[in-house]
Every structure is written in structure tokens, then in C-alpha cells.
Amino acid sequence: MTLEELKQHQKDIEKAIKTFEARKLAEARVALEKQAEKLGVKLSDVVGGSSTTAKSVSPPKYMHPENPEKTWTGRGRKPKWIEEGLAAGKKLEDFLIK
């Protein structure tokens, strides 16, 4: 591999790690909010602050079928690979992360 290819792999891996961490945090937050709700309290009351961050990171909702590093939250502009898939006759549901 060339140095350029290795650096690109490094960037892809760093992005995948950040996406994974954001998704895990979002899942944990939802689970904690549900548990607090069962107890009849708000999570923000328990932890002493807002249960959401100022800039919330949405977990990915859609994933490229051949390259799992390419994801999309469903917010904002559709990525090119989604557009191409839709043009090829696929449905948005075909890209859902299961």
C-alpha cells in the first residue's frame, strides 16, 4: 500500500470509530431515559443537567450495502450513494441499519 492509501484508511477508521462511539452514547442515553421514565423521574433531574447535549449527534440510520463505513443519519442532504441506489430502483428502506 502507498502512504496515501494508508492515510485514507486511517481517516476512514477514525470516522468509523467516532460514528460507533456516537451511536453507543445515543443508545445509552435512550436506555437511561427509559429507565428514569419507569421510575417516574426525568434523566436530567437525576444527573443534574440536560439529558441532551447542546449539539446532539444522531446515530446513523442508513448504511451503504457494500461499504459499512459509509453511513447516513437520515438528516440533511442525501449522500451520493443513496441517490445512486434510489436511481437504480432501490428503496430507502433497503439501506436501513438493522
Image: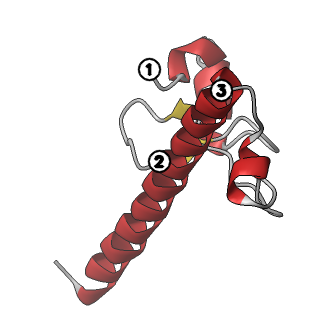
Identity of the amino acid at label 3?
Leu
- Residue 11 left/right relative to 30: left
Of marks 3 and 2, the one in the foreground = 3
In the image, 12 versus 5, the foreground residue is 12
Q: Quarter of the image containing the C terminus?
A: top left
Q: In the displayed orientation, state which residue is furthest to the bottom.
A: 3
Q: Which residue is mark 2?
A: 24
Identity of the amino acid at label 2?
Lys
Q: Earlier in the sequence, mark 1 or mark 3?
A: 3
Q: Position of residue 82 (x, y in %)?
A: 63, 32
Q: How is the image coloured?
A: secondary structure
Q: Position of residue 57 (x, y in %)?
A: 69, 54
Picture residue at 41% right of the left edge, 70% below the top: 14
- Disc 2 to disc 1: CB gap under 8 Å: no
Q: Residues within 10 Å of mark 3 (few under 14, many from 20)?
A: few
Cα–Cα gap, marks 2 and 1: 15 Å
Q: Position of residue 63 (x, y in %)?
A: 49, 34
Q: Earlier in the sequence, mark 2 or mark 1?
A: 2
Picture residue at 65% right of the left edge, 26% below the top: 39
Of marks 1 and 3, the one in the foreground = 3
Q: Which residue is mark 1?
A: 98
Q: Which residue is mark 3?
A: 39
Say if residue 90 shows up in the picture: no
Q: Residues within 10 Å of mark 1 (few under 14, many from 20)?
A: few
Say if residue 73 shows up in the picture: yes
